[in-house]
Image (cartoon, rainbow, N blue to C red):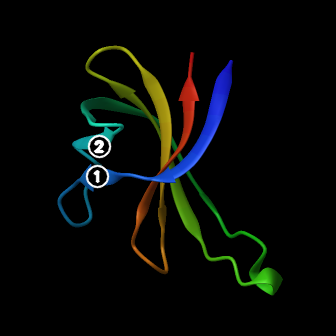
Amino acid sequence: MARIIDRPVEVTAEEGKRPERFCWRGRCYRVSRVLDFWKEVGRWWAGEHEKGFLRVETATGGVFEIYRDCASQRWYLYKVYD
């Protein structure tokens, strides 16, 4: 089961590399591995931009989906898996 969050998060990543960590609700999570990666183009006719999604596993075993809005370069936490 998953909860949709879709809120901005701080992500630490070197340019062009996978995220190393992200912070949400005052807690930082270290990304241990990327489980999946895909891009979505969105509803271009409605002004949505391409997004790069990653499903990641953290060092504590949590699974999250984060994405980067390619136009704004901002990161978002999209889903939290239970």
**Which residue matches tag 1?**
11
In the figure, 45 relative to 18: above or below? below
Number of the label disc, if any, that sits on residue 71: none
Look at 27% across and 37% down and name the residue there.
Answer: 26
- Split into 4 quadrants, where in the image is the C terminus? top right
- In what element is the residue under mark 1? strand
Q: CA distance from mark 1 to mark 2?
A: 4 Å
Whether tag 1 and tag 2 are in contact, CB under 8 A, the answer is yes
Give the x, y percent position of residue 76.
47, 54
Q: Earlier in the sequence, mark 1 or mark 2?
A: 1
Q: Residue furthest left?
A: 14
In the figure, 16 relative to 46: above or below? above
| Residue 20 vs residue 8, the one in the foreground | 8
Give the x, y percent position of residue 48.
68, 77
The quadrant holding residue 29 is top left
- Left or right of 48 on screen, residue 7: left
Look at 68% across and 70% down and name the residue there.
Answer: 41
Residue type, mark 2 in image: Phe
- In what element is the residue under mark 2? strand
Look at 62% across and 77% down and name the residue there.
Answer: 49
Q: How many marks?
A: 2
Residue type, mark 1 in image: Val
